[in-house]
Amino acid sequence: MKTSNYSGFYKLSPAERLNEVAEFAGLTEEEKATIADADSLDIEKADNMIENVIGRFSLPMGVALNFCINKKDVLIPMVTEEPSVVAAASNAAKMARKRGGFTTSSTGSTMIAQVQLIDIPDPNYARIRILENKEKIMEICNAKDPVLVKFGGGMKDLDVRVIDTEEGKMTIVHLKVDTLDAMGANAVNTMAEAVSPFLEEITGGKAYLRILSNFAVHRLARARVVIDAESLGGDDVIDKIITAYHFAAADPYRAATHNKGIMNGIVPIVVATGNDTRAIESGAHSYAARNGRYTSLTTWEKNQDGDLVGTIELPMAVGLVGGATKIHPTAKVAVKMLGVQSASELGEIIAAVGLAQNLAAIKALATEGIQRGHMSLHARNLATVAGAKGEVLEAIVKKMVAEKNVRLEYAQELLKEYEK
Ligand code: MEV
C-alpha cells in the first residue's frame, strides 16, 4: 500500500488489511502482532491502569482510508463499536482528495488550571494583587516540573477572573501552562495545588478547588476542506448540505446530534491512541456553547468557485506521552501508524477526521437519509448476534436488506431455515 487511497480494501481479510497497513506505515512484525492480538494489553498492565480489574474488553479497530492531510497521506486507526463510521469517514476523505484534502492548524498546547479563591471580601483588589505577582506564581509552578520547563513548556501566563455565583463573588485564577506533548492534567493539577498557599497568602482568601479546565480554549485544533460539486453528486447537494448545517447552527437539539456525528470520527482515534475521551468530549461540547448558546462545531459554506467549504475548530487536549498512550501496546502502534511527531499534530488529524465524519453524516442525511447505509451493517451485526457465520451470514444479511426487514428475530428465523 503506497497511498491512503486504496480501493477494494474492504474486500481483504483482516490479516491482509493489516499487511497493507504495515507496509504503508512501516510497522515491524512485532507491531503487526500487537495490532492483531486482542490480548496485547496483558492483565498485569491492565491491573496497573485502573482499580479492581477483573479482565479486559476488546473493541474492533478499523482503518479509515483516503485521508490526505496537509498534503500527506495518512491512515486513520479507529476504535469504535458503531457500524458505518469508518466507511463514512473514508468516503468523505475520498471526496476531499480532489481539491487537495484537509488543511490543519492549531494554537499550541496550553492548558488551563483553575484555582478557585473564596472568602475574599475584595475580590477585584485581590485580582490585581495576583496579577502583580505573576513572576512569583510562575516560579512556584515551574519549580514543580523542571523537565517540562527544560523542553520549553511550563507555566507561561496568568489570567484572573472575578465571577458571580450564588454565594457571591469568587476570584478564579487561571494558570496557563504549556504541556507540550502531554495531555497535561497531572502537570497542571500539581502546579495548581502547589501555588495555592501563596495565592491564599497574597489575597487572604481560601483556595478551594484546584483543577484543570477541560474547556481548553488555548489548545484548539482546526481543519478546513474544499469539496467540489461533482464529487458530492451535484450543485444541489452542496445547497442541501449547507441547509443541513444551518439547522444545526440555529438549533441546539439538532446541534447536539450534528456534533455527536463529529464525535463519531473523533472519539475512535482518541481511544485508539490511548487518550482521554471524556476530556475531548467535554472540551468539544463546552466549546460548542462558548457564545452562550450550544451550536455546531463545524461550518459549511459555498466559495466563489461554487465548491463546498467546511471548517472545524475545537479544543483538543490529547497527548503522546504519559497515560494509556504509553502503556497500551496497541495505542503505541496506532500512534506510529499515524506517523505523528507531536500532540498538536495528532490533534489536528483528529480535527480533520471530525470534519470528514460530519460531512459524511450531513451529506447522507441531506440526500438519501442515513438508514440505507446503516442497514447492511446493522443487518450484519444482527446476523452475527443470531450466531450466523460465513456464507450463511452473507446470505442472511442480503435477504434482510433486500426485504428491508432488519430485525434480530428475523435473523434468528432465517438462520434456523438455513441450518435445516
Ligand atoms: C449517528 O451516530 C450520527 C448522526 O446522527 C450524525 C448527524 O445526525 O449528523 C448521523
Image (tube, grey):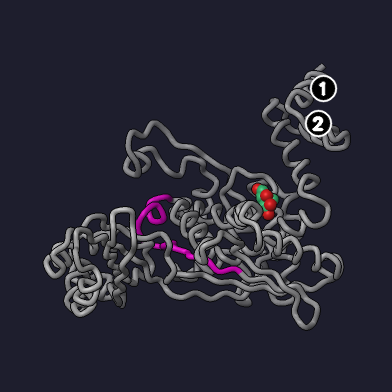
**How far is disc 2 from disc 1 in space, using C-alphas?**
9 Å
Let me know if residue 325 is in the magenta part.
yes
What x and y, as percent, mark residue 195?
A: 18, 65
- In the rendered image, the residue lying farthest to the bottom is 304
Which residues fall within the magenta stretch?
Answer: 312-328
- Residue identified by numbered label 2: 396
Q: To which residue does mark 1 refer?
A: 418
Please tell me which residue lies in front, 41 or 199: 199
Tag 2: Cα neighbours inside 10 Å, few (<14), some, or many (≥20)? many
Q: Residue at x 43, y 62 (%)?
A: 215
In the picture, residue 100 is in which quadrant? bottom right
Q: Does label 2 point to a residue whose CB lies under 8 Å from ligand 1?
A: no
Q: How many marks?
A: 2
Q: Are marks 2 and 1 in contact (CB under 8 Å)?
A: yes
16 versus 199 height, above or below: above
Answer yes or no: is residue 23 visible.
no
Q: Secondary structure at mark 1?
A: helix
Displayed quadrant of residue 193:
bottom left
Residue 62's x, y, as percent?
62, 51
Give the residue type at disc 1: Tyr
Residue 29 highlighted magenta (yes or no): no
* Kind of residue at disc 2: Ile
Percent position of residue 273, x then y? 48, 56
